[in-house]
């Protein structure tokens, strides 16, 4: 690389400031040629490092194929979502009953993973992370689990259906109070657990754990000829777009990566200032 090229790179880096080049990519199923996926991530306007991490890949297991997709949205931490990226699916797949009872395996693995995060709090630091995970089994069965407010949506014949549950403090106020916590509701702010956290369930957050849950909601959806696509995204997207608006925005788009990029760009147009991560799985 010449001196002029190096200088140009440096100028580009300065020009980019705290918003690095978005992470973008795509892949496809080897088992079922009509299934592809794409992802696109962009950092928000905050002064801390990017706190969203993701998984998007197809893996072969003997005669079976798994599509593994996840969004991990950290708060006060980029270390814990990175830990989840490296360990959560491994813990799920290690469960001996995964192939017969994937829903049970996902619930158990979520609990085990959170326990390990709390045990490693000295190394992993404070803060925590939400998670939405989706496993597509042989292109036919979709199992979704989540804690927090990252969301999974499926489109069937152009109609959006939410598969995950947004774990809001205002909705789970009684459970939080039964654990000895409280939900603040200050004017101009969202409800928060103990006046701090804007979600009622999360991984980590050791200082709040006695008042928080890490128990996931789990949903199963069979993939039939009506399925158009799946969208997984962090709340940086869902704060400014409804489920149906997201589905409508990418209707007719064949390239999954272009669809994911389209959704993040639309969220930016709608003035989302949070980190935005999006995965789109397309059924052609």
Image (spheres, rainbow, N blue to C red):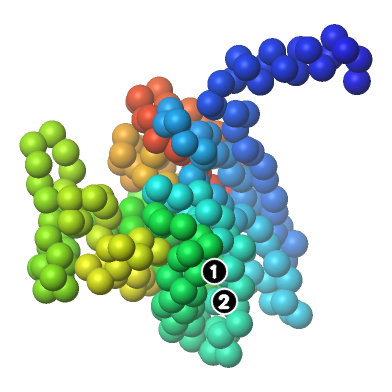
Task: Give the quarter of the figure containing the N terminus.
Answer: top right
Q: How far apart are marks 2 and 1 (CA)?
A: 5 Å
Please say if 247 is above or below 11.
below
Q: Give residue 207's position: percent from left, percent from top.
A: 31, 63
Residue at x-position 67% and y-position 45%: 26
Residue under label 1, please give it: 88
Is 11 on the left or on the right of 173, as rendered?
A: right
Q: Quadrant of residue 47?
A: top left
Kind of element beneath mark 1? helix
Front one among 37 and 214: 214
Front one among 221 and 124: 124
Please say if 88 is above or below 248.
below
Residue at x-position 32% and y-position 34%: 240
Kind of element beneath mark 2? helix
Number of numbered discs visible in the structure rendering: 2
Task: Tell me, yes or no, if residue 163 can be seen here.
Answer: no
Task: Tell me, yes or no, if residue 234 can be seen here.
Answer: yes
Residue under label 2, please give it: 91
Tell me whether circle 2 and circle 1 mark residues in contact (CB < 8 Å).
yes
Q: In which quarter of the image is residue 194?
A: bottom left
Q: How crowded is mark 1: few (under 14 residues within 10 Å), some or many (20 or more)?
A: many
Front one among 284 and 172: 172
Front one among 239 and 81: 81
Q: How crowded is mark 2: few (under 14 residues within 10 Å), some or many (20 or more)?
A: some
Farthest right residue? 2
Q: Which mark is residue 78?
A: none
Residue at x-position 40% and y-position 64%: 203
Q: Give residue 133's position: percent from left, percent from top.
A: 48, 63
Farthest top residue? 4
């Amino acid at each position: 690389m010449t001196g002029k090229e190096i200088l140009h790179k440096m100028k580009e880096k300065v020009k980019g400031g705290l918003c690095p080049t978005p992470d973008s990519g795509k892949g496809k199923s080897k088992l079922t040629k009509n299934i592809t996926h794409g992802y696109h991530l962009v950092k928000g306007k905050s002064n801390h490092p990017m706190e969203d991490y993701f998984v998007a890949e197809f893996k072969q297991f003997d005669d079976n194929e798994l599509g593994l997709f996840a969004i991990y949205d950290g708060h006060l931490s980029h270390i814990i979502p990175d830990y989840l990226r490296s360990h959560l699916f491994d813990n799920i797949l290690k469960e001996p009953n995964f192939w017969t009872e994937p829903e049970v395996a996902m619930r158990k693995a979520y609990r085990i993973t959170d326990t390990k995060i709390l045990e490693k709090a000295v190394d992993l630091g404070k803060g925590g992370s939400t998670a939405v995970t989706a496993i597509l089994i042989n292109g036919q069965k979709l199992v979704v689990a989540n804690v927090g407010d990252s969301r999974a949506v499926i489109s069937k014949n152009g109609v959006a259906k939410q598969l995950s549950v947004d774990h809001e403090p205002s909705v789970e106020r009684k459970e939080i109070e039964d654990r000895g916590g409280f939900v603040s509701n200050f004017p101009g702010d969202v409800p928060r657990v103990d006046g701090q956290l804007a979600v009622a369930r999360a991984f980590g957050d050791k200082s709040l754990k006695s008042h928080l849950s890490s128990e996931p909601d789990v949903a199963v959806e069979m993939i039939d000829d009506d399925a158009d696509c799946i969208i997984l995204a962090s709340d940086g997207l869902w704060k400014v777009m409804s489920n149906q608006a997201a589905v409508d925005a990418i209707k007719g788009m064949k390239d999954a990566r272009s669809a994911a990029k389209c959704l993040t760009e639309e969220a930016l147009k709608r003035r989302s200032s949070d980190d935005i991560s999006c995965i789109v799985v397309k059924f052609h």
